[in-house]
Image (spheres, helix red, strand yellow):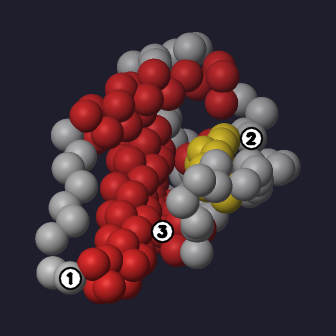
Amino acid sequence: MTFELLPDAMVKLRERIEDEVNIATQKVVLVIVHTAAENTPVDTSKAMSNWRVGIGSGPEGEVGARVPGKGGSSGPAVLYIIGEDAKRAMQNRKVGTAVHIVNNAEHIEKLNNGTGFSKPPGFVEKAELMGSLQIKNTQIRLQ
């Protein structure tokens, strides 16, 4: 390689690094959202429906059940919907822009503490752990 080609090579490398960082970040976000939602106790799916991703700032307010149901019947459909929403939110993210994963359901803290529900408590902490493991296992490929 001659030195006159170096600037173009550096631009291409920078673009490739940004693409790879965005792919890796999306994988981490999806693991966190999926783990948190999958382990959120579900009755009407309102709490599960409130797992949302914001770029630059967190989504505000509480949303209703994305797919109304009872006894957890809508859980799989809601899990799919929030995963697709998270992917869409991440599509136009620029490297360096903060990603916020939020749940504004008014009773999410009680659910996470396990108050009177069948699923084990600590699903938020489990999601954080799974996200950390995803980061640890991430490899950026520049070729």
- In the image, what residue type sits under mark 1? Thr
For residue 5, which quarter of the picture? bottom left
Task: Judge whether residue 71 can be spotted in this image.
Answer: no
Mark 2 residue element: loop
Q: Nearer the viewer, mark 2 or mark 3?
A: 3
Q: Quadrant of the C terminus?
A: bottom left
Q: Which residue is mark 3?
A: 87
Q: Which residue is mark 1?
A: 2
Mark 1 residue element: loop
Q: How many marks?
A: 3
Name the mark on residue 85: none
Rounded to the nearest angstrom, the CA distance separating label 3 from label 1 is 40 Å
Which residue is pictured at 55% across the width and 22% down the height?
Answer: 112
Disc on the earlier residue, 1 or 2? 1
Could you say which is closer to the camera, residue 68 or residue 113?
113
Disc on the earlier residue, 2 or 3? 3
Rounded to the nearest angstrom, the CA distance separating label 1 from label 2 is 55 Å
- In the image, what residue type sits under mark 2? Asn
For residue 109, which quarter of the picture? top right
Vertical position of residue 87 compared to residue 73: above or below? below
Which residue is pictured at 71% across the width and 29% down the height?
Answer: 107
Q: Which residue is mark 2?
A: 104
Disc on the earlier residue, 3 or 1? 1
Could you say which is closer to the camera, residue 11 or residue 20?
11
